[in-house]
Image (spheres, grey):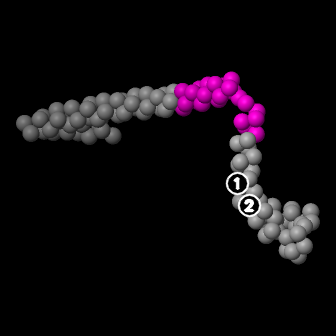
């Protein structure tokens, strides 16, 4: 399309069209160069993003390995117990909500219905 326009302009030669033709030719070459640079930039950009993701995963993996070298089961157990005590009230509230007959117990059916009812992915 562009070359067709350039050829038409070239055949209507006079002083102004000659200058216009050169200007348009330079503009087309410049735009093609910009497009090539942009394509190369996007290729380099995607390679850098991929490399950053790889480096992040590699770093996280090595941090976990380093933490495992100093793993103490008793320390983990204490943190787990604190977490459970913190979340126990949420669990108790959930079970109280599912106990529809208020006898302090829930049946298997009430439990299943409660889990399915609270599911985010229905």
Say which residue appears at 72% left-offset and 36% top-offset. Answer: 75
Q: Mark 2 packing: few (<14 Cα in 10 Å), some, or many (20+)?
A: few
> Which residue is under mark 1?
86
Q: Is residue 58 above or below residue 119?
A: above
Q: Write the start and end of the magenta stretch as one range.
A: 53-77
Please state the horizontal and vertical placement of residue 52, each as a whole percent of the image: 50, 30
Q: Nearer the viewer, residue 105 or 5?
A: 105
- Residue 119 appears in the rendering: no
Q: Nearer the viewer, residue 114 or 121?
A: 114
The tag on residue 89 is: 2
Please state the horizontal and vertical placement of residue 16, each as a whole percent of the image: 9, 39
Q: Nearer the viewer, residue 52 or 65?
A: 65
Q: From the viewer's perspective, is 115 left or right of 61?
A: right
Q: Secondary structure at mark 2?
A: helix
The tag on residue 9 is: none
Farthest residue, direction left:
15
Quadrant including the C terminus? bottom right
Q: Mark 1 packing: few (<14 Cα in 10 Å), some, or many (20+)?
A: few
Say which residue appears at 73% left-offset and 30% top-offset. Answer: 72
Q: Is residue 77 above or below residue 57?
A: below
Quadrant including the N terminus? top left
What is the quadrant of residue 95 in the picture?
bottom right
Please state the horizontal and vertical placement of residue 33, each as a whole percent of the image: 30, 30
Tally of marks: 2
Please state the horizontal and vertical placement of residue 83, each as a whole percent of the image: 71, 49
| Cβ atoms at labels 1 and 2 below 8 Å apart | yes
Q: Secondary structure at mark 1?
A: helix
Q: Nearer the viewer, residue 7 or 41?
A: 41
């Amino acid at each position: 399309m562009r070359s067709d326009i350039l050829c038409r302009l070239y055949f209507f030669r006079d002083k102004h069209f000659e200058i216009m033709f050169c200007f348009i030719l330079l503009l087309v070459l410049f735009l093609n160069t910009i497009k090539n640079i942009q394509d190369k930039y996007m290729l380099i950009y995607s390679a850098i993003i991929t490399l950053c993701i790889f480096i992040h995963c590699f770093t996280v993996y090595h941090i976990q390995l380093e933490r495992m070298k100093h793993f103490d089961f008793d320390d983990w157990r204490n943190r787990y117990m604190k977490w459970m005590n913190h979340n126990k009230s949420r669990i108790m509230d959930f079970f109280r909500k599912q106990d529809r007959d208020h006898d302090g117990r829930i049946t298997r059916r009430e439990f299943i219905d409660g889990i399915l009812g609270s599911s985010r992915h229905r």
